[in-house]
Amino acid sequence: MAESRTIGVFGAGWVGLVTGGCFAELGHEVIVRDVVPDRIAALQAGQLPFHEPDLPEVLARNRERIRYTLDADELAEADTLFICVQTPPTYSGDADLSFVWSALDDLPRGERRQILVMKSTVPVGTGDKVRAALEGRGLANVGYVSNPEFLAEGTAVRDFMRPDRIVIGAFDQQDAASVEALYGGIEAPVVRTDIASAEMIKLAANAFLSTRISFINEIANVCELVGADVESVAQGVGLDHRLGPHFFRAGVGWGGSCFGKDVSALKQLAGNSGYHFQLLAAVIEVNELQKRRVISKLEKHLGRLRGKTIAVLGLAFKPNTDDLRDAPSLVIASRLLAEGAAVRTWDPVADARDRLQGAVQCETVLEAVTGADAAVIVTEWDELQGLASAQVRDAMARPLIIDGRNLLDPEETRRAGFAYEGIGRQSSAFEGLPETPEPVTG
Ligand code: UGA
């Protein structure tokens, strides 16, 4: 167990609350500061502003050790301050660091020597800029450490408590040791390095995960043309211990608030430094095209989409989150609307009504598929595993499923009386309804 210390967190967003909650779980006192009064009031009342499994329980269990405040001066008590603010992309594709700079402006000025720890994902070189900014503000005694997060939405608490590694980049090895000690109780390899390398590890990890997905998506597209099945191919390739099975699921492309932003930021960073990162340019382009392939798959079965009704099943960028940022569903549904199709959407938690004007958001899967000419699985929610049922088939105008996540068994789906089209698998046309036994009459 770690020796209990007091930690300050700038930003009560997803990273800040997971970080604060998990450090409290490790026994530390945590002060979370945000600038949005409603958010702080909600947290003080025990309400979480987003959906993340296990986090409500962690925050509730450690209520006594976590304090939420608007007042940055309260962070003067902390010996370590984690920066967990957003770094959205700017128009140029660089990262917008204005939230980081305002956190610096709000740093409490006390006698105690504090260490500032960057958890937010930032461009390589940010550490040097922050160091210079601290010195410019007369805060040369504040330490600086880069400790990037590798939390995935939906599993963030587990990712924090059981990480694959902890990365700590520092100017000063004592500061690195001090931050490492906060993780006492967590079993994981620790990578101690310089600041620029720590910043690069985060960007390179997300860029490589995205590259793997774009790679398997291109393999899937070729599989369709040559009669191979990408699921078997991914399994056979992934069993090579040098390659591994993870992030090798073909589908409608990656989304979320991190991959797109971080891949672009790394490509941009390379470009600004005089290097053209060709591979990442292709990774991004493959992903954009992958989302749009759903449209041609629908056209293959239905012809022109004008006047057709399409059910878009799953809106969140992945299951177990309500996050719609960069979600493939938004591109797919918008393209369908642009083609003149009627779009009916369903998701168990995400609400896209304000982003998809003209689409009808339904409460249930059955409601969404009723009268539809096709159902497209965009997010692999568990609820969709039973989609190929007689009830769904009978409710649809045409029994066609486009399985954008290869969630269903193609053979079973075909036997249940659907035309089926996955990603990187052989498709099947509608073969008529399965034979049902004659009812026994008296
Ligand atoms: C990602 C990384 O996985 C985290 O390690 C990282 O910390 C985080 O970004 C971040 O930078 O903060 P996240 O965006 O929450 O996490 O979601 P992922 O589970 O990585 O999924 C991203 C997208 O890739 C989803 O749309 C998912 O459907 C897609 N995906 C994932 C595939 O299409 N195929 C796969 O095999 C895996």
Image (cartoon, grey):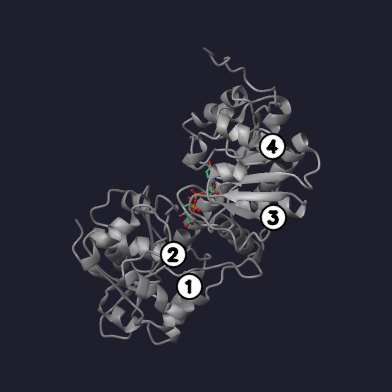
Which tag is nearer the camera, tag 3 or tag 1?
3
Q: Which mark is residue 186?
A: none
Q: Residue at x 66, y 70 (%)?
A: 91
Which tag is nearer the camera, tag 4 or tag 2?
4
* Residue type pointed to by label 3: Ser
Which class describes the residues within 10 Å of circle 1: few (<14), some (14-19), or many (20+)? Answer: some
Which tag is nearer the camera, tag 3 or tag 2?
3
Element at badge 4?
loop
* Residue type pointed to by label 1: Asp
Which tag is nearer the camera, tag 4 or tag 3?
4
Percent across and percent down for residue 268 are 63, 63
Q: Residue under circle 2? A: 195
User: Alpha-carbon distance for marks 4 and 3?
Assistant: 22 Å
Q: Residue under circle 4? A: 397
Q: Residue at x 30, y 78 (%)?
A: 75
* Residue type pointed to by label 2: Ile
User: Alpha-carbon distance for marks 3 and 1?
Assistant: 42 Å
Check whether the beta carbons of the residues at disc 3 and disc 2 lie within 8 A of each other. no
Check whether the beta carbons of the residues at disc 2 and disc 1 lie within 8 A of each other. yes
Q: Earlier in the sequence, mark 4 or mark 1?
A: 1
Nearer to me, 334 or 184 = 334
